[in-house]
Image (tube, rainbow, N blue to C red):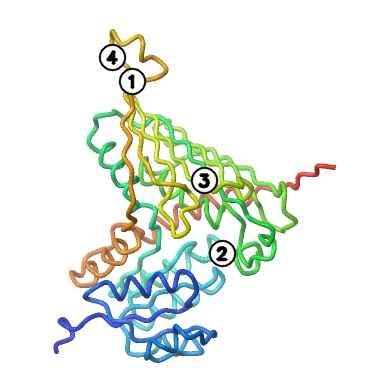
Amino acid sequence: MSPDSRPLRAGIVGYGYMGQIRRRNVSDHPDLELTAICDPVRNEEIQNLNIPIYNCWEDLVAAEIDLVFVCTPNYMIPEIAVKALENGKHVFCEKPPGRNLADIQRIRAAELANQDSKLIFGFNHRHHPGITDAKAIIDSGTLGEILTLRGVYGKGGGYDYPASWRNDPEISGGGILLDQGLHMLDLFHLFVGEFSEVLGMRGTVHYDIPVEDNAVVILRTPKGQLAQLHSSATSWKHTFRLEIGCETGYIIISGLLSKTGSYGRETMIVGRSPARGEKAAIGNPREETTYYDHDPSWDIEVAHLVDCIRQNKPVEKGTSSDALRVMEIIDRVYREPIFKFYSK
Protein backbone atom coordinates (compact mmCIF):
# COMPACT_ATOMS: atom_id res chain seq x y z
CA MET A 1 0.00 0.00 0.00
CA SER A 2 1.44 3.38 -0.99
CA PRO A 3 1.68 6.21 1.58
CA ASP A 4 -1.02 8.11 -0.33
CA SER A 5 -3.54 5.26 -0.33
CA ARG A 6 -3.28 4.04 3.26
CA PRO A 7 -5.42 5.69 5.98
CA LEU A 8 -3.85 8.52 7.93
CA ARG A 9 -2.50 7.26 11.24
CA ALA A 10 -4.00 9.25 14.12
CA GLY A 11 -2.98 9.58 17.75
CA ILE A 12 -4.95 11.17 20.58
CA VAL A 13 -3.33 12.95 23.53
CA GLY A 14 -5.86 13.07 26.35
CA TYR A 15 -8.68 10.55 26.45
CA GLY A 16 -11.31 12.43 28.43
CA TYR A 17 -14.64 13.71 27.12
CA MET A 18 -13.21 15.29 23.96
CA GLY A 19 -10.67 12.54 23.35
CA GLN A 20 -13.48 10.01 23.27
CA ILE A 21 -15.43 12.13 20.79
CA ARG A 22 -12.37 12.32 18.55
CA ARG A 23 -11.90 8.56 18.78
CA ARG A 24 -15.41 8.16 17.40
CA ASN A 25 -14.67 10.70 14.66
CA VAL A 26 -11.57 8.73 13.67
CA SER A 27 -13.50 5.45 13.68
CA ASP A 28 -16.23 6.92 11.49
CA HIS A 29 -13.87 8.39 8.88
CA PRO A 30 -12.77 5.91 6.18
CA ASP A 31 -9.44 7.68 5.71
CA LEU A 32 -8.37 7.65 9.37
CA GLU A 33 -6.99 4.92 11.59
CA LEU A 34 -6.44 5.27 15.33
CA THR A 35 -2.96 3.96 16.11
CA ALA A 36 -2.04 5.46 19.51
CA ILE A 37 -3.41 7.12 22.64
CA CYS A 38 -1.67 8.95 25.47
CA ASP A 39 -3.51 9.16 28.78
CA PRO A 40 -2.48 8.40 32.37
CA VAL A 41 -5.78 6.64 33.09
CA ARG A 42 -5.97 3.00 32.05
CA ASN A 43 -9.71 2.42 31.95
CA GLU A 44 -11.32 -0.62 30.42
CA GLU A 45 -12.27 1.20 27.23
CA ILE A 46 -8.68 2.19 26.49
CA GLN A 47 -7.39 -1.29 27.20
CA ASN A 48 -9.93 -2.80 24.82
CA LEU A 49 -8.75 -0.66 21.91
CA ASN A 50 -5.71 -2.91 21.37
CA ILE A 51 -3.40 -0.10 20.28
CA PRO A 52 -0.25 1.36 21.89
CA ILE A 53 -0.99 3.45 24.99
CA TYR A 54 1.70 5.97 25.92
CA ASN A 55 2.42 7.45 29.31
CA CYS A 56 4.28 10.46 27.87
CA TRP A 57 2.84 12.61 25.11
CA GLU A 58 6.38 13.22 23.83
CA ASP A 59 6.58 9.55 22.85
CA LEU A 60 3.29 9.71 20.97
CA VAL A 61 4.18 12.77 18.88
CA ALA A 62 7.53 11.16 18.04
CA ALA A 63 5.88 7.91 16.90
CA GLU A 64 5.12 6.94 13.32
CA ILE A 65 1.78 8.69 13.05
CA ASP A 66 0.44 11.36 10.71
CA LEU A 67 -2.08 13.30 12.78
CA VAL A 68 -2.20 14.28 16.45
CA PHE A 69 -5.42 15.21 18.25
CA VAL A 70 -4.63 17.43 21.24
CA CYS A 71 -7.48 16.95 23.76
CA THR A 72 -5.81 18.05 26.98
CA PRO A 73 -6.37 20.79 29.57
CA ASN A 74 -5.43 24.23 28.27
CA TYR A 75 -1.99 24.57 29.81
CA MET A 76 -0.65 21.55 27.89
CA ILE A 77 -1.95 22.51 24.45
CA PRO A 78 0.83 24.84 23.20
CA GLU A 79 3.75 22.58 24.05
CA ILE A 80 2.14 19.49 22.53
CA ALA A 81 0.98 21.30 19.40
CA VAL A 82 4.36 22.94 18.81
CA LYS A 83 6.29 19.69 19.32
CA ALA A 84 3.92 17.80 17.03
CA LEU A 85 4.32 20.39 14.27
CA GLU A 86 8.09 20.30 14.69
CA ASN A 87 7.92 16.52 14.29
CA GLY A 88 6.14 16.93 10.97
CA LYS A 89 2.69 15.89 12.23
CA HIS A 90 -0.63 17.39 11.28
CA VAL A 91 -2.43 18.75 14.35
CA PHE A 92 -6.01 19.03 15.52
CA CYS A 93 -6.23 21.21 18.65
CA GLU A 94 -9.29 21.50 20.81
CA LYS A 95 -10.29 24.94 22.03
CA PRO A 96 -9.19 27.15 23.62
CA PRO A 97 -5.79 27.44 21.94
CA GLY A 98 -3.96 27.59 25.24
CA ARG A 99 -4.31 29.82 28.27
CA ASN A 100 -3.54 33.21 26.76
CA LEU A 101 -2.62 35.21 23.68
CA ALA A 102 1.06 34.26 23.93
CA ASP A 103 0.14 30.57 23.63
CA ILE A 104 -1.64 30.91 20.28
CA GLN A 105 1.13 33.19 19.01
CA ARG A 106 3.64 30.48 19.86
CA ILE A 107 1.60 27.83 18.04
CA ARG A 108 1.25 30.07 14.98
CA ALA A 109 4.99 30.59 14.88
CA ALA A 110 5.50 26.82 14.82
CA GLU A 111 2.89 26.49 12.09
CA LEU A 112 4.69 29.08 9.97
CA ALA A 113 8.02 27.29 10.47
CA ASN A 114 6.53 23.90 9.49
CA GLN A 115 4.31 24.68 6.53
CA ASP A 116 4.01 21.07 5.35
CA SER A 117 1.91 20.34 8.44
CA LYS A 118 -1.78 21.25 8.64
CA LEU A 119 -3.20 22.80 11.81
CA ILE A 120 -6.86 23.20 12.78
CA PHE A 121 -8.70 24.25 15.93
CA GLY A 122 -11.95 22.74 17.17
CA PHE A 123 -14.51 25.49 16.68
CA ASN A 124 -17.26 22.99 16.00
CA HIS A 125 -20.10 25.46 16.64
CA ARG A 126 -19.46 26.84 13.15
CA HIS A 127 -20.70 23.53 11.78
CA HIS A 128 -23.90 23.18 13.78
CA PRO A 129 -26.84 22.99 11.34
CA GLY A 130 -28.60 26.06 12.72
CA ILE A 131 -25.45 28.11 12.22
CA THR A 132 -24.68 26.82 8.72
CA ASP A 133 -28.27 27.44 7.59
CA ALA A 134 -28.22 30.94 9.06
CA LYS A 135 -24.92 31.69 7.32
CA ALA A 136 -26.37 30.54 3.99
CA ILE A 137 -29.35 32.87 4.42
CA ILE A 138 -27.12 35.81 5.34
CA ASP A 139 -24.80 35.12 2.40
CA SER A 140 -27.78 35.02 0.02
CA GLY A 141 -28.49 38.67 0.81
CA THR A 142 -32.22 38.15 1.28
CA LEU A 143 -32.17 39.85 4.69
CA GLY A 144 -29.72 42.56 3.72
CA GLU A 145 -26.70 43.53 5.78
CA ILE A 146 -26.19 42.42 9.36
CA LEU A 147 -26.76 45.31 11.76
CA THR A 148 -26.40 43.68 15.18
CA LEU A 149 -25.42 40.45 16.88
CA ARG A 150 -26.47 39.43 20.36
CA GLY A 151 -25.28 36.22 21.94
CA VAL A 152 -25.96 34.49 25.24
CA TYR A 153 -24.01 31.39 26.15
CA GLY A 154 -24.52 30.22 29.68
CA LYS A 155 -24.68 27.24 31.94
CA GLY A 156 -25.44 26.36 35.51
CA GLY A 157 -22.14 25.54 37.12
CA GLY A 158 -23.52 23.26 39.79
CA TYR A 159 -22.47 22.69 43.39
CA ASP A 160 -19.06 21.28 42.43
CA TYR A 161 -18.25 23.96 39.85
CA PRO A 162 -15.54 25.65 41.97
CA ALA A 163 -13.54 22.39 42.07
CA SER A 164 -13.24 22.15 38.28
CA TRP A 165 -9.78 22.52 36.76
CA ARG A 166 -11.38 24.99 34.36
CA ASN A 167 -11.44 27.52 37.21
CA ASP A 168 -7.77 27.12 38.10
CA PRO A 169 -5.95 29.93 36.24
CA GLU A 170 -2.68 27.99 36.27
CA ILE A 171 -4.35 25.21 34.27
CA SER A 172 -7.08 26.97 32.30
CA GLY A 173 -5.89 30.56 32.02
CA GLY A 174 -9.32 32.05 32.59
CA GLY A 175 -12.95 31.47 33.41
CA ILE A 176 -16.24 31.11 31.58
CA LEU A 177 -15.36 33.62 28.85
CA LEU A 178 -12.33 31.62 27.77
CA ASP A 179 -13.97 28.26 28.29
CA GLN A 180 -17.33 28.84 26.63
CA GLY A 181 -17.72 32.44 25.49
CA LEU A 182 -14.97 32.14 22.91
CA HIS A 183 -17.27 29.89 20.83
CA MET A 184 -19.75 32.76 20.52
CA LEU A 185 -16.97 35.23 19.73
CA ASP A 186 -15.85 32.92 16.93
CA LEU A 187 -19.40 32.88 15.56
CA PHE A 188 -19.48 36.68 15.67
CA HIS A 189 -16.34 36.67 13.52
CA LEU A 190 -17.89 34.13 11.18
CA PHE A 191 -20.82 36.42 10.46
CA VAL A 192 -19.28 39.91 10.40
CA GLY A 193 -15.50 39.55 10.34
CA GLU A 194 -13.07 41.75 12.25
CA PHE A 195 -13.88 44.02 15.18
CA SER A 196 -12.18 47.36 15.65
CA GLU A 197 -13.54 48.20 19.11
CA VAL A 198 -13.78 45.95 22.16
CA LEU A 199 -15.23 46.76 25.57
CA GLY A 200 -15.51 44.13 28.26
CA MET A 201 -16.30 43.55 31.89
CA ARG A 202 -15.92 40.36 33.90
CA GLY A 203 -16.83 39.49 37.42
CA THR A 204 -17.02 36.76 40.00
CA VAL A 205 -20.61 37.28 40.99
CA HIS A 206 -21.47 34.00 42.70
CA TYR A 207 -18.78 31.34 43.01
CA ASP A 208 -15.72 31.54 45.21
CA ILE A 209 -13.24 31.09 42.37
CA PRO A 210 -10.23 33.14 41.16
CA VAL A 211 -11.59 33.58 37.61
CA GLU A 212 -14.75 35.11 36.17
CA ASP A 213 -18.08 33.33 36.34
CA ASN A 214 -19.71 36.04 34.18
CA ALA A 215 -18.47 38.31 31.43
CA VAL A 216 -20.04 40.88 29.12
CA VAL A 217 -18.34 41.93 25.90
CA ILE A 218 -19.45 44.69 23.51
CA LEU A 219 -17.86 44.97 20.07
CA ARG A 220 -18.08 47.12 16.93
CA THR A 221 -16.83 46.44 13.41
CA PRO A 222 -15.18 49.10 11.23
CA LYS A 223 -18.51 49.34 9.36
CA GLY A 224 -20.37 50.11 12.59
CA GLN A 225 -22.07 46.76 13.20
CA LEU A 226 -22.58 46.10 16.91
CA ALA A 227 -22.24 42.82 18.82
CA GLN A 228 -22.91 41.90 22.43
CA LEU A 229 -22.01 38.73 24.34
CA HIS A 230 -23.01 37.58 27.79
CA SER A 231 -21.04 34.52 28.89
CA SER A 232 -22.24 33.07 32.19
CA ALA A 233 -21.76 30.18 34.59
CA THR A 234 -24.82 31.28 36.60
CA SER A 235 -27.56 30.89 34.01
CA TRP A 236 -28.73 27.77 35.89
CA LYS A 237 -30.56 26.67 32.78
CA HIS A 238 -28.05 25.86 30.05
CA THR A 239 -28.57 28.47 27.35
CA PHE A 240 -27.39 29.08 23.81
CA ARG A 241 -28.98 31.91 21.85
CA LEU A 242 -27.64 33.93 18.93
CA GLU A 243 -29.74 36.77 17.52
CA ILE A 244 -28.77 38.24 14.15
CA GLY A 245 -30.49 41.53 13.34
CA CYS A 246 -30.49 42.51 9.66
CA GLU A 247 -31.82 45.29 7.46
CA THR A 248 -34.98 43.43 6.43
CA GLY A 249 -35.40 40.77 9.10
CA TYR A 250 -33.69 38.64 11.69
CA ILE A 251 -32.48 35.15 12.52
CA ILE A 252 -32.49 33.57 15.97
CA ILE A 253 -30.59 30.34 16.62
CA SER A 254 -31.43 28.86 20.01
CA GLY A 255 -30.80 25.58 21.73
CA LEU A 256 -27.82 23.44 20.93
CA LEU A 257 -27.50 19.82 20.02
CA SER A 258 -25.38 18.28 22.77
CA LYS A 259 -24.76 14.95 24.44
CA THR A 260 -26.99 15.75 27.42
CA GLY A 261 -29.65 17.71 25.55
CA SER A 262 -29.61 20.27 28.37
CA TYR A 263 -29.43 23.24 25.98
CA GLY A 264 -32.74 22.29 24.40
CA ARG A 265 -33.66 21.39 20.86
CA GLU A 266 -31.68 23.33 18.28
CA THR A 267 -33.89 25.70 16.30
CA MET A 268 -33.56 28.50 13.78
CA ILE A 269 -36.23 31.20 13.56
CA VAL A 270 -36.33 33.52 10.55
CA GLY A 271 -38.49 36.64 10.67
CA ARG A 272 -38.88 39.36 8.08
CA SER A 273 -39.70 42.99 8.64
CA PRO A 274 -43.26 43.85 7.55
CA ALA A 275 -43.84 45.21 4.07
CA ARG A 276 -46.00 48.25 3.38
CA GLY A 277 -49.59 47.46 4.13
CA GLU A 278 -48.77 44.86 6.80
CA LYS A 279 -49.53 47.10 9.77
CA ALA A 280 -50.78 44.19 11.83
CA ALA A 281 -47.35 42.57 11.62
CA ILE A 282 -45.39 45.54 12.95
CA GLY A 283 -43.63 44.40 16.09
CA ASN A 284 -44.83 40.83 15.61
CA PRO A 285 -43.88 39.63 12.12
CA ARG A 286 -44.46 36.18 10.70
CA GLU A 287 -41.74 33.69 11.54
CA GLU A 288 -40.53 30.42 10.09
CA THR A 289 -39.01 27.87 12.47
CA THR A 290 -36.66 25.04 11.54
CA TYR A 291 -35.84 22.24 14.00
CA TYR A 292 -32.65 20.17 14.05
CA ASP A 293 -32.10 16.76 15.58
CA HIS A 294 -28.66 15.71 14.33
CA ASP A 295 -25.27 17.26 15.08
CA PRO A 296 -22.70 16.60 12.34
CA SER A 297 -20.31 19.30 13.55
CA TRP A 298 -17.65 17.05 15.10
CA ASP A 299 -17.35 14.90 11.99
CA ILE A 300 -17.41 17.87 9.59
CA GLU A 301 -14.39 19.62 11.06
CA VAL A 302 -12.35 16.40 11.13
CA ALA A 303 -13.35 15.66 7.53
CA HIS A 304 -12.27 19.18 6.56
CA LEU A 305 -8.81 18.62 8.01
CA VAL A 306 -8.45 15.24 6.29
CA ASP A 307 -9.45 16.79 2.97
CA CYS A 308 -6.90 19.58 3.42
CA ILE A 309 -4.19 17.02 4.17
CA ARG A 310 -5.04 14.79 1.22
CA GLN A 311 -5.48 17.65 -1.25
CA ASN A 312 -2.59 19.65 0.22
CA LYS A 313 -4.69 22.79 0.46
CA PRO A 314 -4.92 25.43 3.20
CA VAL A 315 -7.22 24.94 6.16
CA GLU A 316 -10.16 27.30 5.68
CA LYS A 317 -12.24 26.87 8.84
CA GLY A 318 -10.92 26.72 12.38
CA THR A 319 -7.61 28.24 11.31
CA SER A 320 -4.93 29.58 13.60
CA SER A 321 -6.03 33.05 12.42
CA ASP A 322 -9.54 32.32 13.68
CA ALA A 323 -8.08 31.22 17.02
CA LEU A 324 -5.85 34.28 17.21
CA ARG A 325 -8.73 36.69 16.62
CA VAL A 326 -10.84 35.39 19.50
CA MET A 327 -7.83 35.24 21.81
CA GLU A 328 -7.01 38.86 20.99
CA ILE A 329 -10.50 39.88 22.11
CA ILE A 330 -10.31 37.80 25.28
CA ASP A 331 -6.86 39.21 26.02
CA ARG A 332 -8.24 42.76 25.84
CA VAL A 333 -11.08 41.88 28.21
CA TYR A 334 -8.69 40.08 30.59
CA ARG A 335 -6.53 43.18 30.88
CA GLU A 336 -9.38 44.80 32.81
CA PRO A 337 -9.68 44.06 36.54
CA ILE A 338 -12.04 41.35 37.71
CA PHE A 339 -14.58 42.38 40.33
CA LYS A 340 -16.26 40.21 42.94
CA PHE A 341 -19.89 40.81 43.81
CA TYR A 342 -20.57 41.01 47.50
CA SER A 343 -24.19 40.29 48.39
CA LYS A 344 -23.78 40.89 52.10
176 in relation to 55, above or below: above
Q: Earlier in the sequence, mark 2 or mark 4?
A: 2
Q: Nearer the viewer, mark 3 or mark 4?
A: 3
The residue at which mark 1 appears reads as 273
Label 2 and label 3: CA atoms lie apart by 24 Å
Kind of residue at badge 1: Ser
- Secondary structure category for the residue under label 1: loop
Q: Nearer the viewer, mark 2 or mark 1?
A: 1
157 in relation to 165, above or below: above
The quadrant the N terminus occupies is bottom left
Q: Residue at x 34, y 51 (%)?
A: 293
Label 2 and label 1: CA atoms lie apart by 43 Å
Q: Earlier in the sequence, mark 2 or mark 3?
A: 2
The residue at which mark 4 appears reads as 275
Q: Position of residue 219 (x, y in %)?
A: 50, 38
Q: Marks 2 and 1: CB-CB under 8 Å?
A: no
Kind of residue at badge 3: Thr
Label 4 and label 1: CA atoms lie apart by 7 Å
Q: Position of residue 327 (x, y in %)?
A: 50, 55
Q: Nearer the viewer, mark 2 or mark 4?
A: 4
Q: Determine which of the numbered discs, if any, sits on residue 108 in the image.
A: none
Tell me if mark 2 has few (under 14), some (14-19) or many (20+) residues whose alpha carbon lies within 10 angstroms of its own. many
Q: Residue at x 67, y 56 (%)?
A: 211
The residue at which mark 2 appears reads as 99
Q: Picture quarter containing residue 22?
A: bottom left
